[in-house]
Amino acid sequence: MKKFYVFLFILILTLPCFGCRSATQPPLSQVETDLLAVSQNLNGMEKGDGKALKRYYGLNLNDFEEVLIYVPANYMDVSELLVIKAKDPAQLDLIEEAVDTRNAMQLESFGGYGPEQVALLDNYEFKIIGNTLFYCVSPDASVLKDTFIKSMKK
């Protein structure tokens, strides 16, 4: 019986050493740094704010934990990047719907005269990791998505 208590005592003392890895995600400022490192200044895009989020996606900045948005640098570009960390997983459906609507509107706008833009819009990248959604339309979209995934796993 004494051996059992000694074993139990040792087990209790060592369990914290084998604790679960934290499921916290990095701040979007770190993700942004990683994304900028692979695509200088996110070619063809400029950093947006809450107004851009509302204008392009119909979403309110204050509804989310963190938002990173890059919008087209001029009206003939379609390159854009959106990374949103939702407060609640239920918000991801709303964000995904807004992204689908935005992409459909862009396809409609450029469908008649912008084959290069349409090709980019057709090959957008989309990924959800935890409560964070990634959407990108860019010639570098797949590289940016891979970087996003790596950054979220840090």
Image (tube, grey):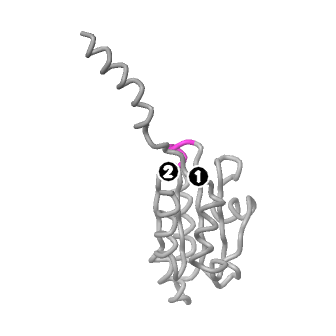
Q: Are marks 2 and 1 in contact (CB under 8 Å)?
A: no
Callout 2: helix, strand or loop?
helix
The residue lying at 52 percent from left, 80 percent from top is 140
Percent across and percent down for residue 110 are 56, 82
Callout 1: helix, strand or loop?
strand
Mark whose residue sits in front, 2 or 1: 1
Spatial separation of the CA atoms under disc 2 and disc 1: 13 Å
Percent across and percent down for residue 40 are 63, 80
- For this rendering, which residue is in front, 1 or 108? 1
For the N terminus, the image quarter is top left
Residue 100 relative to residue 39: left or right: left
Quarter of the image for residue 19 reads top left
Percent across and percent down for residue 141 are 50, 75
The residue lying at 52 percent from left, 72 percent from top is 144
Label 2 sits on residue: 93
Percent across and percent down for residue 42 are 63, 77
Residue 47 relative to residue 38: left or right: right
Label 1 sits on residue: 85
The residue lying at 48 percent from left, 64 percent from top is 150
- The numbered disc on residue 54 is none
Quarter of the image for residue 51 reads bottom right
Amino acid tagged 2: Asp
- Magenta segment: 88-93
Task: Categorize mark 2 by other alpha carbons within 10 Å: few (<14), some (14-19), many (20+).
Answer: few
In the image, residue 18 above or below residue 80? above
